[in-house]
Amino acid sequence: MIRRIAARLLTYLAKQKPGRPPFAFHDNKGRAYYAWGDFSELPRLRRLEVDTVMLWVDAGRPRKAVEEIGDAIRAQAEAAAGAKQQGERSKALAAIAALSQELLMRTSLVPEECYYALAAATCVREDESDPAVIDPAIHQDKIDTFRLAGRAGHAFFTTPILKATLGVVYTTESNWKRLLMEWAREQARHEAALKVCAPASAQ
């Protein structure tokens, strides 16, 4: 009973924030978030951030994964250049070919990191002083918060604007468990590819 009253009070207080979009949810640490209802309502900097993330969605890979593959290719190129035996050089060149193929692979699945980045860009946390500006540290903390909660099965951050952007496949409770399994499989495959193609010195 006391918890329900406290939750209602927190929600009431959260709604009393002038200059912010409508109240949307509390995270698992009790912090209030506010979210716009439509993409057209987003401030300019947040629209630009969403556009940037959507480029990675279209690419089928989050930026971090692309950077990891790029680093692995560079490491293998260095291994090939420094190889003293033909076998070592051939192995490094084969790894470069495999990594290049991995980089070109595309899926229709919205990458997990992109999902959390979109959620973070389209809502404002109570400690963000200006809703029109994206604080890099808070933005990353929001992504980390959503990732931890999402992987634990708590997708409270699926706001109306996120539903409008990604559709019901990515924003319904019934599909969330399936998404988590698909993301986990994709992450495992990515990590396996990097491990198999790592230079001998790094294994």
Image (cartoon, grey):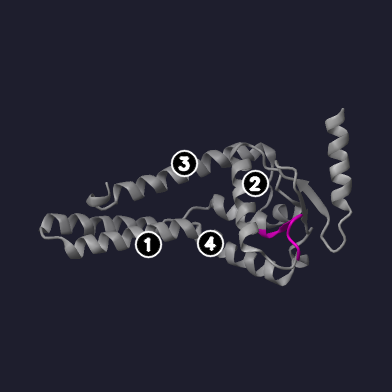
Tag 3 residue: 185
Q: Amino acid at mark 4?
A: Trp
Q: Is residue 5 above or below residue 10?
A: above
- C-alpha span from label 2 to label 1: 31 Å
So how many labels did they put on this image? Answer: 4
Q: Nearer the viewer, residue 100 or 120?
A: 120
- Can you name the residue that lies furthest to the left here? 85
Marks 4/3: CA–CA distance: 19 Å
The correct choice, above or below, for 62 with respect to 149 in the image is below
Q: Quadrant of residue 175?
A: top right
**Residue 187 appears in the rendering:** yes
Q: Earlier in the sequence, mark 4 or mark 3?
A: 4
Crowd around label 1: few <14 · some 14–19 · many ≥20 (10 Å): some
Q: Which mark is residue 90?
A: none
Give the spatial CA distance, label 1 vs label 3.
Answer: 21 Å
Local packing at callout 3 (Cα closer than 10 Å; few below 14, some 14-19, many 20+) is: few
Q: Locate the N terminus by quadrant.
A: top right
Q: Residue 21's quadrant in the figure?
A: bottom right
Residue 110 visible at all? no
**Residue 195's x, y, as percent?**
33, 47
- Residue 169, numbered circle: 2
- State the extent of the magenta-drawn residues as a range: 121-130
